[in-house]
Amino acid sequence: MKLRTDLRQRHLEAFETEYNARRDDDARGVSYEAGLVVRAAVAAGWFTDATDPDAVGDMRPGEAREWSKKVNAAYIEAIKTDPN
């Protein structure tokens, strides 16, 4: 999978919409959260070569956690402001 490097406001809005729509209010563990983050990113178009959020369920748990970390890092990078 290849994560976009050119995230814009629309990508973050789509991610947040997907994330909130897929999230339930029951407390879950780290594997659930990792899958949720990656599924939302796939559905929001954050990956250039992945389009099926349900395919995340077939990932190895460690792979899903790594992609979740990358998605979170991309989100943080996208919301940084230019200090100039």
Image: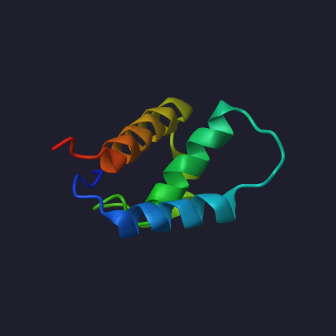
Whether residue 52 appears in this view of the structure is: no
Does residue 82 appear left or right of residue 60 in this picture? left
Q: Position of residue 44 (x, y in %)?
A: 45, 66
Which is more toward the observer, 82 or 55?
Answer: 82
Whether residue 82 appears in this view of the structure is: yes
The C terminus - image quarter = top left
Does residue 25 appear left or right of residue 63 in this picture? right
Does residue 15 appear left or right of residue 30 in this picture? left
* Residue drawn at (57%, 40%) of the image: 34
Its colouring scheme is: rainbow
* Residue drawn at (30%, 51%) of the image: 3
Does residue 63 appear left or right of residue 33 in this picture? left
Which is more toward the observer, 17 or 80?
Answer: 80
* Residue drawn at (34%, 44%) of the image: 74
- Quarter of the rendering containing residue 27: top right
* Residue farthest right in this picture: 26
- Quarter of the rendering containing residue 51: bottom left
Q: Position of residue 10 (x, y in %)?
A: 38, 70
Which is more toward the observer, 3 or 21?
Answer: 21
Please tell me whether residue 11 is drawn above or below residue 69 in the rendered image.
Answer: below
Q: Position of residue 13 (x, y in %)?
A: 47, 66
* Residue drawn at (56%, 34%) of the image: 61
Q: Position of residue 71 (x, y in %)?
A: 41, 44
* Residue farthest front in this picture: 84
Count of numbered tags = 0
